Image (cartoon, grey):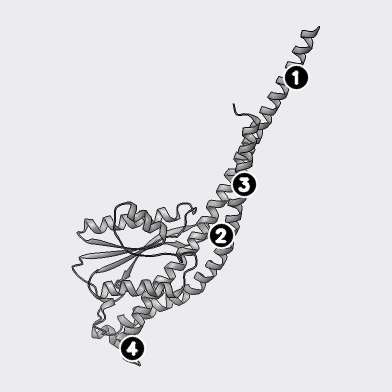
Amino acid sequence: MASVQDLKRRVRSITNTRKLTRAMELVASARLRRAQQRIEALRPFADAMAELISEAAGRTRVQGQPLLDQREQPNNVAILLLTGDRGLAGGFNGSAVRRAIDESRAAEREGLGVRWLVVGRKGAGTIRFRGLQVEQAWTGFTDRPTYQDAEAIGHRVIELFASGEVDRVVMVYNAFRSALVQQITADVLLPLAAPEIREKSPREIAMEGLLLFEPEADEMLATLLPTAVETAVYRALLESAASEHGARMSAMRNASDNASDLIESYTLAMNRARQAEITQAILEVVAGADALQ
């Protein structure tokens, strides 16, 4: 049985740890509120952008846009994995990595080559630890991403897709639903809006009405499509950032609760040990007094 001093040291150590976890919970809570405001402000714009692209490409006979190219015989797929730079966030990073690995295995079963693009130190480190090659990693901004970060990532995936080095880009990230709920999502980033874009018959166009563009549709879409990719990446970065803060807040709250339970348990054991020492001391005094008689 541990001595009273040992139990005191354990209680003191766990109490200090609880102070840290509570502080981290408060910091994550404050950052979560800001991240949640940012993603809620962006969602309407991102949805409107996707709807505009789908409507414009679906109701015109636009051709020659490489980002809309549905390739019949793909050879390579790029997996864009979004994780965090830090841990202590429960299953936030691990669940995203597992889903990305599942996507890569599914692509390999189709006979496709897989290329890895990773956001966040945790994801990049895990992928490398598994013996896979990370073609490019972006780190240092996952807790507060900016649009410039999304531009850099979007430019790279567009470059890979437009040059034909990859035929599909799948983006895996944690979508924010609430402070307690994060949903793992795997979206096809490129080609853009593949299910909605299709060539329509003259009769369908006549019934729906032909959209007129100024400037021309080709010129407009050539500008809008890269922006749509960057916006989709930016939205995913904000979703992932809010999810990370929510996951860390929950993890630190659970850690604080567990620390409180341990402190209570050790305190009870310490009181029992102290009582045992007092009882033993009384017995020794009584035994000594009897010996003197």
**Dot 1: element:** helix
Residue 35 image position (x, y, % from top left):
52, 67
Residue 259 image position (x, y, % from top left):
59, 43
Which numbered disc flags the more N-terminal residue, 2 or 1? 2
Disc nearest the viewer among 4 and 1: 1
* Location of mark 3 (residue): 16
**Dot 2: element:** helix
Residue type beneath disc 2: Ala
Disc nearest the viewer among 2 and 1: 1
Please identify the quadrant where the N terminus is shown. Answer: top right
Which numbered disc flags the more N-terminal residue, 3 or 4? 3
Q: Dot 2 surroundings within 10 Å: few (below 14), some, or many (20 or more)?
A: many
Q: Are marks 3 and 4 in contact (CB under 8 Å)?
A: no
Write the residue at 59% across / 51% down.
Answer: 20
**Separation of marks 3 and 4 at Cα, in angstroms:** 65 Å
**Separation of marks 2 and 1 at Cα, in angstroms:** 52 Å
* Location of mark 1 (residue): 282
Q: Which mark is residue 217?
A: none
Q: Nearer the viewer, residue 122 or 243?
A: 122
